[in-house]
Amino acid sequence: MAQTDYYQVLGLNKNASPAEIKRAYRKLAVKYHPDKNPGSKDAEERFKEINEAYAVLSDPQKKTQYDQFGSAGFHERFSQEDIFRGFDVGDMFKDAGLGTDDIFSRIFGGGSFQRGGTRFGGARKGADYTMELTVSFQEAYTGCEKRVAFMRDGKREELSVKVPAGVDTGARVRVAGKGREGVGGGPPGDLYLTVTVMSDPMFKREGDDIVADRQVRFTEAALGGSLDITTLEGRKRIKVPAGIQPGTKIRLAGLGFPRLGSGGRGDFYVRIGVRVPEQLTPPQRELLAELAEKGL
């Protein structure tokens, strides 16, 4: 399932509303429910896919992460246990005469599926720990390794965590097995680091793109010229076309943030502003008046 498009699984597009997601899930889940397809392994696998897709797309937090990072990036952050944590279809199939508890317990396994806060089986995974992790704009761009310290089951632990290039505020970095110890022989929980990316005085982030504002004189805007620009990859020279309008963006392809989970990079944009002098010398005023007379 790790590379499957959850929207395709439910036959939806990314703009589907919560109500549409629920309707699509119920229709498909009833169709492929094991009670309606006894002995069919294909139907059982399809039923698993449908439930996994709905477990993510029906949860606003998980859906946001999936939409932001794509399938591959999402599965780097969320385990199967995370996906189904808190998942509850309630009595959605009751009017169709189909059960839920026994079916889910059987096909998802006693230790991996949770319904209504109750886990099937005696072994339970330990609780997850969460921490805040702050990285600089540059560290988010290049990726980095951060040393973190935390308390685990009453003992202080330290570890190094790799933060992937392209990470954005709100992303979670998962460190498997570093949560609370499991119960009844269950596995330990995980440690989740919620990332905050610091702002930068020179650059702004827009998705995977970077935007830098630069001012030019109005004569440069009218006549054109060139500018030396600082990017996160060093200095670059760009051409400013004659007649450029305020707010126009000049694109430097591939100099934005790496796209997590999908490959490639965003772009770097220089947004041009026109600097108007607040004071003019008498000769400057005279020249501008002459230009105004000529229709400029």
Image (cartoon, rainbow, N blue to C red):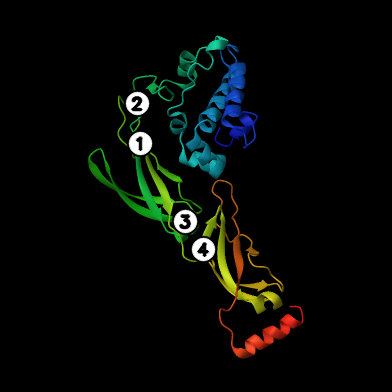
Name the kind of residue labelled 2 in the image: Arg
Residue corresponding to mark 3: 140
Badge 4 marks a residue whose secondary structure is loop
Chain-order first, disc 4 or disc 3: 3
Label 4 neighbour load within 10 Å: few <14, some 14-19, many 20+: some
Of labels 4 and 2, earlier in sequence is 2
Mark 3 vs mark 2, CA separation in Å: 35 Å
Instruction: Give the alpha-carbon distance from disc 1 to disc 2, as whole Å.
Output: 12 Å
In this picture, residue 223 sits left or right of residue 42: right
**Do the residues bearing badges 1 and 3 touch, measured as CB atoms within 8 Å?**
no
Residue 177 marker: none
Q: For the residues marked 4 and 3, what is the alpha-carbon distance in whole angstroms?
A: 13 Å
Instruction: Name the amino acid type tagged 3.
Output: Ala
Q: Residue at x 58, y 12 (%)?
A: 39
Mark 4 residue type: Phe
| Residue 290 position within the rendered picture, expressed as x and y whole percent measured from the top left | 72, 85
